[in-house]
Image: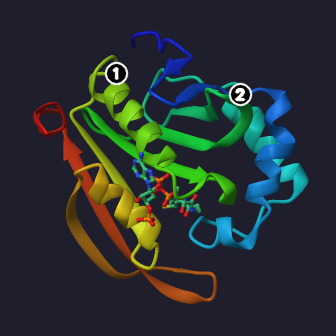
Amino acid sequence: MPEIRLPISTKRLILRRFEGRDLDAFHAYHSLPETARFLPGPPKSYTQSMERVGKYANFVYEKEGDWVCLAIEAKDSPELLGEVVLKWLPGLGQGELGWSLAPGARGQGYATEAAEAVLDLGFGELGLHRIEARLDALNAGSAALCERLTMRLEARLVDKWHYKGQWATELVYAILDMEWRCR
Ligand SMILES: CC(C)(COP(=O)(O)OP(=O)(O)OC[C@H]1O[C@@H](n2cnc3c(N)ncnc32)[C@H](O)[C@@H]1OP(=O)(O)O)[C@@H](O)C(=O)NCCC(=O)NCCS
């Protein structure tokens, strides 16, 4: 596997490895019900945030099932805005994107900018062929983000999960390496 060169710099953002100093900011948004609404499990406890930041800080990307986990920071301010993740899925050249932002960082295109950089990384240095995103059909923010990224809606899996006390329909968006390069 090629080495992942960090940090990644975009127009407004730095994408870097998580550090211990990110814990409080990470916990501040991951302890909120509105952040947890479309993520597995309830809002995170401080211990769960500690475990997650520890995992993100020490990520390795060497084999199927591994994740690239990047902290999102604005260039003009060193605070944590959110995270973007890319999972190496089983099968040749397959990946899955994920994202979360702190409430104060939403509505400014930061998730789009960070996800674009991770698609560049996935289809460039990491040599992936297809990258997908899976989301609850009620998660309008994530669906709009997939559309902005020009990902294709490939599947609508009705009542695929039961979580948070109700059935949830899953949308699968995806994009291929050639499509990303030619968009
Ligand atoms: C999903 C999530 C990351 C989307 O965040 P977001 O802020 O809507 O997405 P972006 O950062 O790309 O910002 C897009 C918004 O900024 C606006 N914007 C402003 N400047 C922009 C720019 N330069 N480029 C793109 N969009 C810009 C867009 O018009 C859009 O606004 P709208 O929602 O009113 O249409 C966020 O809702 C979140 O963290 N949710 C909780 C966790 C979660 O559900 N994670 C995903 C589980 S699948």
Q: What element carries label 1?
A: loop
Tell me if mark 2 has few (under 14), some (14-19) or many (20+) residues whose alpha carbon lies within 10 angstroms of its own.
some
* Residue found at x 34% / y 34%: 119
Q: Residue 126 carries which label?
A: 1
Image location (x, y in percent) of residue 5: 49, 11
Question: Identity of the amino acid at label 1?
Answer: Leu
Residue at horizontal 57 percent and vertical 34 percent from the top: 69
Q: Does the residue labelled 2 lie within 8 Å of ligand 1?
A: no
On the image, numbered disc 2 is attached to which residue? 57
Q: Is residue 87 visible?
A: no
Viewer-proximal residue, 76 or 82?
A: 76
Quadrant that contains the N terminus? top left
Q: Vertically, is 80 above or below 61?
A: below
* Residue at image point 54% right, 30% down: 13
Q: Quadrant of residue 137?
A: bottom left
Q: In this view, does 106 lie to the left or right of 24?
A: left
Query: Disc 1 versus disc 2: distance between alpha carbons?
Result: 19 Å
> SS at mark 2?
helix
Residue farthest toward the bottom in the current orientation of the protein: 166
x then y, percent, for residue 138: 44, 79
Q: Which residue is drawn at 73% across and 72% down?
A: 33
Measured along the vertical axis of the image, is residue 3 above or below residue 111? above
Q: Nearer the viewer, residue 66 or 49?
A: 49
User: As rendered, which of 23 and 164 lies closer to the eye?
Assistant: 23
Quadrant placement of the C terminus: top left
**Left or right of 83 in this view: 143:** left
Q: Is residue 127 above or below residue 163?
A: above
Disc 2 marks a residue whose amino acid type is Ala
Q: In the image, residue 18 lies at what x, y percent? A: 70, 29
Badge 1 or badge 2: first in the primary sequence: 2
